[in-house]
Amino acid sequence: MDFGLITFGSLLPDPHTGTLLSQRQRLRDVVSAAEAAEQLGFAWYALGEHHFGERDVIPSPAVVLAAIAEHTSSIRLATGTTLLANRDPVLVAEDYALVDLLSNGRLELVAGGSFYPQAWTVFGQEPASKAVRKRENVELLLRLWNEDQVTWTGQFRPPLDQVSLQPRLTQSRPPLWLSAGVGSESVPLAVEHGLPVVVGTIGRPPVDYVDVFGDYRRQWRLAGRTDPPGRLGAASHFFVARTSQAARSLWSEYINNYLSANGAGAARGPFDFDAHISPDGPAICGSPAEALDKLGRLHELWGHDLHLLAIDLGGIPYAEVQKATELVASEILPHLSGLGTTSAVPQPTAAETAETAVNA
């Protein structure tokens, strides 16, 4: 299994000290953390894209990834996610081809649409059009990256007449993943185009996502595809310290600060930290042994082979983020090499096997 870090550039006052970094310093910390992640052995470093809220400061991951590309050499540089449903796919294709070139073929683009209403309002788009926009833009992006010249007509942008995208990707195969969630339209779209998927697993109990992972594999089989299923990724709000008590004591105020800030989505009741990090909760917090145990149980539940960890949330000082990251690298990563093997992937049922044969 591959492990990586994901950040949204969260910029909030430290709830203990009231300290608020400048936007420039926060972005410099994001770049520095990517350098450190590569040195510590993480496989991915991913940037989220958020617009117009007060909580996060990365509306254009491509710009920041280009800066990171100049300070790293091997770590995969990812988005988590690019709001492809909201953006012009021609500009996305150009911007991220540049990132792929600057990074010497290390781009991984995870495509989705905005979860928050501000982007839809400001961009003058209907939230109800998300699924249709995502499909149209994914299919156009793939054509722009795969074909030398594209002539195309769609619903949401002007037509193209023999457009040749420049620059070209370094990678021979488009490094495109789709983001998905509970009830997502992304699974059939991903299966249709043979794309891997990252499931947004940060907001619900882990058991709620079992059907998303399973449905992807099931639809892949029933589609009669002869190629192996694409990779599957997940993500968690995450924190570790030497002891469970230290981790809980330090992190509780920061994760509450993050989830309570503007941009956290629908209003919720009082934050139950213990439930949030419990075995049945979405987040991981504790000692390295506790974190290892929960990561293993999540893998047994989902059978995924990529996990992204969101550590730098809620105004937590960069020094504390680095301590936790180094602890993951030294105490957790060495013990996870056995995860992500094919033996962990659920096998088809007899009914599914029969249905595949009928549809073949």
Image: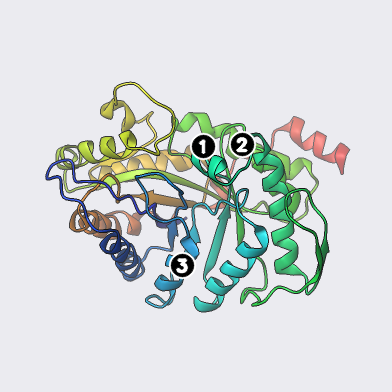
- CB-based contact (under 8 Å), mark 1 and mark 2: yes
Left or right placement of residue 154 versus residue 54 in this view:
right
**Which label lies toward us, 1 or 3?**
1
Left or right placement of residue 23 versus residue 94 in this view:
left
Question: Tag 2's secondary structure?
Answer: helix
Q: Report the front residue among 74 and 218.
A: 74
User: Marks 2 and 3, Cα distance to the nearest angstrom?
Assistant: 26 Å
- Report the residue marked by disc 3: 63
- Report the residue marked by disc 1: 117
Residue in the image at 22% along x and 44% along y? 287
Q: Is residue 116 visible?
A: no
Mark seen at residue 55: none
Residue in the image at 27% along x and 35% along y? 256
Measured from the top left, where is residue 224 in percent x and y?
80, 46
Measured from the top left, where is residue 194 in percent x and y?
71, 54
Q: Quadrant of residue 42?
A: bottom left
At label 1, which amino acid type do we have? Pro
